[in-house]
Image (cartoon, grey):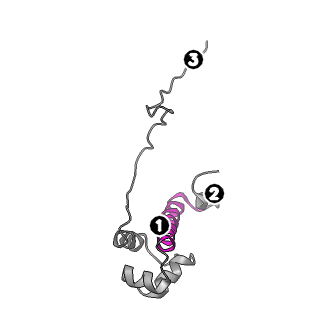
Amino acid sequence: MSRNPFLDLGFPPEEAMALHIRSQLAVLLEQYIERKGWSQTVAARALKVPQPTISKIVNGNIEKLSIEFLIKLMVRAGLPVGLAAGRRPAARSASGRRAAHHSSATA
């Protein structure tokens, strides 16, 4: 099982990644709205979008919302947004140091 449920559901890797990113952004926005105790109307006003857009985010109907749009809402909300691409960092040990990967060959 991977960290991406869309990959596990059989979506092609590139589509699974886009779906996963979109859903993660929407969940973060939904959690933010909930933490603030905002109604959908108040959230819409604060984020400068129509209330039905907030309804889509809160109810998980995000397939027509672009990743770029969701990032813009995150920035409007003052939430941090970052992107990591390329190789995954090496695993770290409990001490925070990079774990050494040793391999031993047996004859």
Q: Label 3, label 1: how many angstroms apart (C-alpha)?
A: 45 Å
- Residue receiving disc 2: 8
Q: Is residue 21 above or below residue 102?
A: below
Q: Earlier in the sequence, mark 2 or mark 1?
A: 2
Find residue 4 and report its horizontal and vertical position in percent. Answer: 57, 57
Q: Nearer the viewer, residue 74 or 78?
A: 78
For label 1, the crowd category at 10 Å Cα-Cα, with few meaning under 14, some 14 to 19 and many 20 or more, is some
Q: Residue at x 49, y 70 (%)?
A: 35
Q: Residue furthest top?
A: 107
Which numbered dot is residue 52?
Answer: none
Q: Residue at x 63, y 60 (%)?
A: 10
The type of residue carrying mark 2 is: Asp
Residue 31 in magenta?
yes
Prevailing secondary structure class for the magenta stretch in the rendered image? helix
Q: Is residue 82 above or below residue 33?
A: above
Q: Nearer the viewer, residue 34 or 63?
A: 34
Q: Nearer the viewer, residue 6 or 97?
A: 97
**Is the residue under label 1 in contact with that under label 3 (CB below 8 Å)?**
no
- Residue receiving disc 3: 105
Q: Label 2, label 1: how many angstroms apart (C-alpha)?
A: 19 Å
Find residue 76 and report its horizontal and vertical position in percent. Answer: 34, 73
- Residue receiving disc 1: 25
Q: Which-is-in-front pick, marks 2 and 1? A: 1
For label 2, the crowd category at 10 Å Cα-Cα, with few meaning under 14, some 14 to 19 and many 20 or more, is few
Answer left or right for 83 relative to 62: left
The type of residue carrying mark 3 is: Ala
Range drawn in magenta? 11-35
Secondary structure, mark 3, is loop
**Is the residue under label 3 in contact with that under label 2 (CB below 8 Å)?**
no
